[in-house]
Image (tube, rainbow, N blue to C red):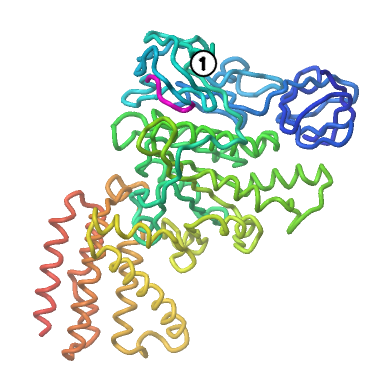
Amino acid sequence: MQGTLFRVAGPVVVAKGMAAKMYDVVRVGKERLMGEVIQIAEDKVIIQVYEDTSGLKPGEPVFNTNKPLSVELGPGLLTSIYDGIQRPLPVLQKEQGDYIFRGLDAPGLDPKKKWDFKATAKKGDKVEGGNSIGEVEETPGLIHRVMVPPGKGGKIAELKSGKYTVDEAIGALDDGTELKLKQVWPVRKPRPVAKKLNPTLPLITGQRIFDALFPVAKGGVAAIPGPFGAGKTVAQQTLAKWCDADIIVYVGCGERGNEMTEVLSEFPALTDPKSGKPLMNRTILIANTSNMPVAAREASVYTGVTLAEYYRDMGYSVAMMADSTSRWAEAMREISSRLEEMPGEEGYPAYLATRLAQFYERAGRVHPLSGEKEGSVTLIGAVSPPGGDFSEPVTQNTLRVTKTFWALDAKLAQRRHFPSINWLTSYSLYLDILEPWYAEHVNKDYRSLVNEFMSILQEEEKLLQIVQLVGSDALPEREQLTLEVARMIREFFLQQSAFHEVDTFSDLQKTRRIMKSILLYRDLGQEALQKGTRIQKILEVKAKNEIVNSKFEKNYEKLLDSVEKALQQEFAALG
């Protein structure tokens, strides 16, 4: 049923004379701009439009599609670059040039490309929604499992291997349901799973501060809040490159155009360290810059998490980076104010906490319906608090639902300490649940080494306050040694170069060995103090400064063995 435009207020428009359901997708005006129903009041339908509404005027037609905002799921998602509503940007650029004109539309998946489908089920097999029935090699070495759409099921009446486009039928069920390579799924609806599992496996990132002090589990959630220039984007790009997830979904939500341009130009050029092939082969990028229509920002986050859930259902571990959820919340605030809703804290809508919780709850490690052993979606959301104020509503509401908090510090960034994670305000609630895994796969002493590092860093903070009053020479010798060990932890261990070919990734065994070497110096120093050696001689031990070189060495074990031997010899010579 066609309605008529009644009122226009930026991206929020009001239509009259049409029947609609909440979250129906509609086409607004003569240019058929895409929008979504967000409120219904008697005979008026309030719509948020995902495109620029300049020039719209009352009286123009509004068409209802009677479908919710949905994305196309199937082979061809990987290597793609989309906008917030799954329009492929390279396709739009090819058709229209560098500027996206209003009313443009393009399918999320290439309708012409033929894929080589190999059936793994056969005629007569009984299948349920989510079951895997075949596979396609989507990118070199990555198998895309073709599944029965959730909610469908029965006996397979027909299924053939061959070359198909995403819109062609590859088979059918006995009830007449056509099976295709493609599924369509509403973005606001979480995809169903067989069972949720406890997050007992770590997401290995190769970043020492994350893997040792503040780990995140596969299927877990982490937040990276930090002010402008503290290194959020570099941290997320490093995580995307090195974390041991099978698939990466990177959502640039409301970020500056030049920052997103860097991501779009750098990612396709990156080499996957695991396979040696382009990293884009297992990456999906969603770009919604700050100058794009504000309403599409909200959609971009849901689009990203739906794509992540789809690959999780195939049995893959997926890491989704959302940069940044603050811009998403700002979009909600703008739409809410145009709807004249009662504002909450700092003008954000009263449902901000609920929306954030609903988004982060879509993370998880699960048994998928496909029959694969397990899959997971790990959500890592960047937060951009104005002025670095962590007490503002988006950061505080994010803290309530995330178990890992990586707090970026502008002062550390100014001192060129990267990653600029503040070890005193950051935390991870996954340490206890991951301890058995570390004990089995790394070493039984791993957790105790981490605990010792944290206690030294916390003690350093207390001592530095005394040092500011009386100077370091006035401290007892044992505490002067603690300050030196804390300095070594900061400079030798926590600092890590994202741009050095070796130091950019530190495996867990290397991380543990560096921790052991630093604590060996601490233990030998404490023994020497007990025997009456002066602190100055202990601080002048030369071998300890060689520990830092192990960060940049591939053959770190040999170097650390010789450093530890040299440490023992130097301390023995001190008597």
Q: Position of residue 107 (x, y in %)?
A: 58, 18
In the displayed structure, would residue 215 be above or below residue 317?
A: below
**First to last magenta residue range:** 129-135
8 relative position to 253: left or right: right
Tell me if residue 138 is in the magenta stretch: no
* Numbered-mark total: 1
Q: Secondary structure at mark 1?
A: loop
Q: Position of residue 36 (x, y in %)?
A: 73, 30
Q: Nearer the viewer, residue 406 or 188?
A: 188
Residue 24, located in which quarter of the rendered image?
top right
| Residue underneath mark 1 | 110
Q: Position of residue 349 (x, y in %)?
A: 74, 51
Which residue is at a point 72% across and 25% down the rendered structure image?
34
Quarter of the N terminus within the rendering: top right
Quarter of the C terminus within the rendering: bottom left
In the displayed structure, would residue 26 be above or below residue 228?
A: above
Q: Nearer the viewer, residue 401 or 155?
A: 155
